[in-house]
Amino acid sequence: MNQGKGLLAKLGRLQRFLLPPWWTEEEEPHKMSLRYRWLWVSGVLSALLVSLTPLVAMTVINIYEYQKAFEAEIQFPVQRQVSNTRRSIEFFLEERRAALNFIIHDNTFEALSEQERLTGIFKNMKEFFGGFVDVGLIDSQGIQRSYVGPYGLKGRSYEQQVWFDETVLRGSNVSDVFLGYRKFPHFVIAVKNEKRDGDFYILRATFNAEIFDNLLASIEFRPSSDVFIVNRAGVLQTPSRSNGPILSMTQLPVPPYSDRTEVRDVVDRDGHPTLVGYAYIKDSPFVLMVAERHETLMKDWITLRRNLLIFLIVSMVLITVFVLAGSRNMVTRIWEADLKRASVLHQIEYTNKMASIGRLAAGVAHEINNPMAIINEKAGLMKDLMMLEEEFPKKEKFLSLVDPILTSVDRCRTITHRLLGFAKRMDVRVETIHMDLLIREVLSFLEKESSYRNITIHLSFADDLVPIQSDRGQLQQVFLNILNNAFAAVKDGGRIDISAEPRGIEKVAVTITDNGVGISEENIKHIFEPFFTTKEKYGTGLGLSITHGIVEKLGGQIEVRSALGEGTSFVVTLPVQRREE
Amino acid sequence: MERLRVLLVDDEEELVSTMVERLRLRDIEADAETDGYRALDRVMASDYDVVLVDVKMPGLGGMELLGEIRKERPDVPVILLTGHTAEQEGVEGMRIGAFDYLMKPINIDDLILRMRDAAGRRQG
């Protein structure tokens, strides 16, 4: 359960890193419009397409080419080794056949029939050629007429044996390896000579099959290779490491005849793909074979291919992560720029609107002054006359009527003054501002509301508060906006604390704290963004956005802290000296 | 204290006439004029201690009248009357020679104080 949560949290973090921040937003205006989603998706897709396609194509081609090169590299030495070995074996057989041919042509039947003579020849054969086990002379009836060797086979008949027929037919023969009378594996080389009378005789020598082992052992194959000889029926003529003992059937199919050395892929009886190099040994029943299982041969290649694939996958993952993150940043920036542009446009619109209202307000204020002055003077005169007259009837009553007229005129004066102040707010004018006075001025706009709603406003200004250089009108708007929000947030009978104190020698901080409904963590993130409002029907979502804009323009900062149900605190920090921008 | 002689110039007949009456009640010799040119003639012809001039008037405007008086009778101090919202005009007027400026609607006691001040300055 906990593990699952941990994984979810990790995925969440990954999503935040890779997906645009507004991907999961459900509410306007942060809900990403289709345009940005499409921008993000198309960005990701095209970047992935252009970066991954060549990578995948390159890897596939590489793997294909490497495999081809690797196979060629394996095949070539096999072919060369098989060729070399084939030549050695052919030479060995040819040499011995030539020796036998020389002997049989150099000696008459009668001469070879002499045991002594044959013994002498055999001694020379063994000494100069080697490999001979025995030698015998056989007449045309297949009877061994003389014999030199360890087995005492004189008088034996070979008429029924295959090699005899072959020799009679072809003039010479190299036999398969067989057990024969001796009960150990050997093979025969026999040559025929014809007498003048048409009769013939055969000189036959036998060789221990182990001779092949020596021949094959002297050739350097790779340690894992299985090198052996079979006959054309597939019977092993030498023991094979993985295909069975001598004279058993090989596991591999006998490859088709070819007069050249061949290398090909076959499948053995157990279904293992195997690379086989082979050569048919000329004038013999032998087929030289070198077999190696693919899995051993390709071990290096498989490692290499695995590394290539790991590289491919790691690269793909990295590229994808970078593309996602890059696309996220790009689209987020575009989105932010669009939002900012919209905010600037609306601020301009708002400023224009305010400028129009300002001009109108100024006009009204000017026009009202004269009638107000007349009312002022008339009422003043009335009061003068009453005061001068000792016996004015109902003097008290009339005075109590005139005085409110005069105070009302005074109030009108304050109103026109404010209207004008509002109009002036549009011009940037730097002047010396006493923060406490400015805040009291702004509060005068809200006096009525605070007394109706019984809202307590507590002011606290530090003694060492220095006047700052800033724009009066703009600051009035800033604090009016914040205070309006505070008034909207508190219930009737609520409390708003306003304090101002220096921050170091360069800044002044004004803190406005209410004990209202507070702002949720989610909303606080967006509070200074244009068009963000919680006032549903009647909010423009521009107030705090513009406030933020003004404070920044004046070189200050605005921060907000809030807890739902406990209240909200805005801190506006302003520079004492206005920096020219 | 000598009796002050003042001229009030404003195109609002109701305003000046009432002010004149109120000033007279306070023992000040006040005359009213609603036209700039006639006001200039009066200033030339008689000897006022102070002239109170509204900035906004049809015909000869307050600023022009101020200019003329400064030229013809530089010894007569001028106090400007401006709309409450046009502080800038008052400041401008003082730059070209007005003794002071007051913003409408005005407080009568404040006005008398300033006028005495101006007259005293003139004599002093």
Image (spheres, rainbow, N blue to C red):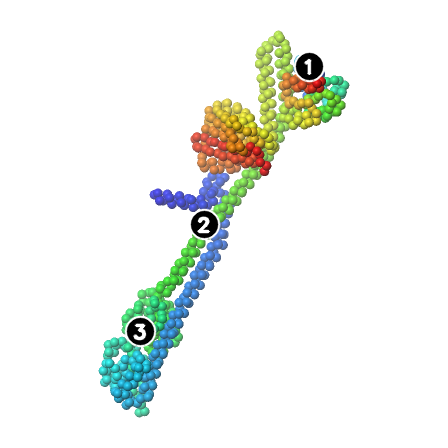
- Would you say the residues marked 1 and 2 are in contact, meaning their CB atoms lie under 8 Å apart? no
Where is residue A341? Give x, y as percent: 55, 41
Q: Nearer the viewer, mark 2 or mark 3?
A: 3
Residue B28, label in figure = 1
Looking at this view, name the residue that lies furthest to the bottom: A197
**Label 3: how many Cα within 10 Å (few below 14, some 14–19, many 20+):** some
Instruction: Kindly identify the residue that appears in the image at 45 percent across and 36 percent down.
Output: A521
Disc 2, SS: helix
Instruction: Kindly identify the residue that appears in the image at 26 percent across and 83 percent down.
Output: A148
**Total numbered labels placed on residues in the image:** 3
**Which residue type carries mark 1?**
Ile
Which quarter of the rendered picture does the N terminus of chain A lie within? top left
Q: Which residue corresponds to mark 2?
A: A321
Report how far apart the C-alphas of labels 2 and 3 lie in the structure. Answer: 61 Å
- Would you say the residues marked 2 and 3 are in contact, meaning their CB atoms lie under 8 Å apart? no
Horizontal arrangement in the rendering, residue A489 relative to residue B17 (left or right): left
* Chain under callout 1: B
Instruction: Kindly identify the residue that appears in the image at 43 percent across and 52 percent down.
Output: A317
Task: Say if A454 sits above or below A208 in the image.
Answer: above
**A307 and A68: which one is in front?**
A307
